């Protein structure tokens, strides 16, 4: 089983990516090993405290009646993890799909993803899973008709994100192709956003992403707001470990932050505002 070492930042000095491979530490010159964990297992634990899968299915039903994907024959899913939501999106909304490539950096997640694809979940579609980060991936052999990014934006730096958007426009996406982004709307208070900010992990905001996509030449074809329910008011040790992977704080510091911002006492703190945006070239 693939495992990752979580390290946290002590002295600010030189920009690096934290050892957990989630969110880049702002800068660091010393790392302290905290624990060995399975990224795939931690991600699964997070999904146990939210309803993303069920909510996304409802969103897809709405999108199906408003956006025409009939021209999409090739699709890349970036940061796909185990791929269940991306596969579900392709199965429900891309009726003429012939090629599906998933890109994921976590080896254990890639194993699960490949097993899912080998079950024939996308009949008549040529499928593959690539173990690579979005930064290191060389890109598709030829431009594709759609790119899905449903779990990606908070795991790469702003600079890498802007570079990726430029590649989408100039190399990855065909003329008339689409890019689908799901991301949080941080202007709406939620326990997860407040906790992330309190611990120094500034989540990417959808509005910022839309501006960056427009800056490289994409235009918005469709957007839809939706709400997840993600309860971090009394998190398990696994959830706290997941949060530490982004922020570098100790478990006691993470739990102290939960107490400080009153997640147990404030109403509606389990509501996590999100937006799905569909862009075209």
Image (cartoon, helix red, strand yellow):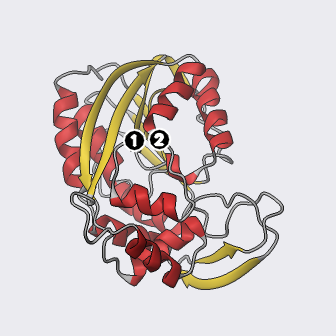
- The relative height of residue 59 versus residue 278 in the rendered view (above or below) is below
Question: Pointer 2: what residue?
Answer: 205
Between residue 272 and residue 70, name the one nearer to us: 272
Percent across and percent down for residue 220 are 40, 19
Percent across and percent down for residue 85 are 31, 50
Question: Pointer 1: what residue?
Answer: 187
* Residue at the image position 70 percent from the left and 60 percent from the top: 17
- Which of label 1 and label 2 is nearer to you? 1
Q: State the separation of the CA atoms marked 1 and 2.
A: 8 Å
Rendered image quadrant of residue 64: top left
* Residue at the image position 30 percent from the left and 23 percent from the top: 69
Query: Judging from the image, what secondary structure is the residue with disc 1 in?
Result: loop
- The relative height of residue 266 versus residue 219 in the rendered view (above or below) is below
Using a 10 Å C-alpha cutoff, classify the residue at mark 2 as few (fewer than 14 neighbours), some (14 to 19) or many (20 or more): some
Using a 10 Å C-alpha cutoff, classify the residue at mark 1 as few (fewer than 14 neighbours), some (14 to 19) or many (20 or more): few
Percent across and percent down for residue 129 are 49, 52
Q: Earlier in the sequence, mark 1 or mark 2?
A: 1
- Tell me, yes or no, whether the two marked residues, 1 and 2, touch with CB atoms within 8 Å: yes
Query: Judging from the image, what secondary structure is the residue with disc 2 in?
Result: loop
- The relative height of residue 248 versus residue 63 in the rendered view (above or below) is below
């Amino acid at each position: 089983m693939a495992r990752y070492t979580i390290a946290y930042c002590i002295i600010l000095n030189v920009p690096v990516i934290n050892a957990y491979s989630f969110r880049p530490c702002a800068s660091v010159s010393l790392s302290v090993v905290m624990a060995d964990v399975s990224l795939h297992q931690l991600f699964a634990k997070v999904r146990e405290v939210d309803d993303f899968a069920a909510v996304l299915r409802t969103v897809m039903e709405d999108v199906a009646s408003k956006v025409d994907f009939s021209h999409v024959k090739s699709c890349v899913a970036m940061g796909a993890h185990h791929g269940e939501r991306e596969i579900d999106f392709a199965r429900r909304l891309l009726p003429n799909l012939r090629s599906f490539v998933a890109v994921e950096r976590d080896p254990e997640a890639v194993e699960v993803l490949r097993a899912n694809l080998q079950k024939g979940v996308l009949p008549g579609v040529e499928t593959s899973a690539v173990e690579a980060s979005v930064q290191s991936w060389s890109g598709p052999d030829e431009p594709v008709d759609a790119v899905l990014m449903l779990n990606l934006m908070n795991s790469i730096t702003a600079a890498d994100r802007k570079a990726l958007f430029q590649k989408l426009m100039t190399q990855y996406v065909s003329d008339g192709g689409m890019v689908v982004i799901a991301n949080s709307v941080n202007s709406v208070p939620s326990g997860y956003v407040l906790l992330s900010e309190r611990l120094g992990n500034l989540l990417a905001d959808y509005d910022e992403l839309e501006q960056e996509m427009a800056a490289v030449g994409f235009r918005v074809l469709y957007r839809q707001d939706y709400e997840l329910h993600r309860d971090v008011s009394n998190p398990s040790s696994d959830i706290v470990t997941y949060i530490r992977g982004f922020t570098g704080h100790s478990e006691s510091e993470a739990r102290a932050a939960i107490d400080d911002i009153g997640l147990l006492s404030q109403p509606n703190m389990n509501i996590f505002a999100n937006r799905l945006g569909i862009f075209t070239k």
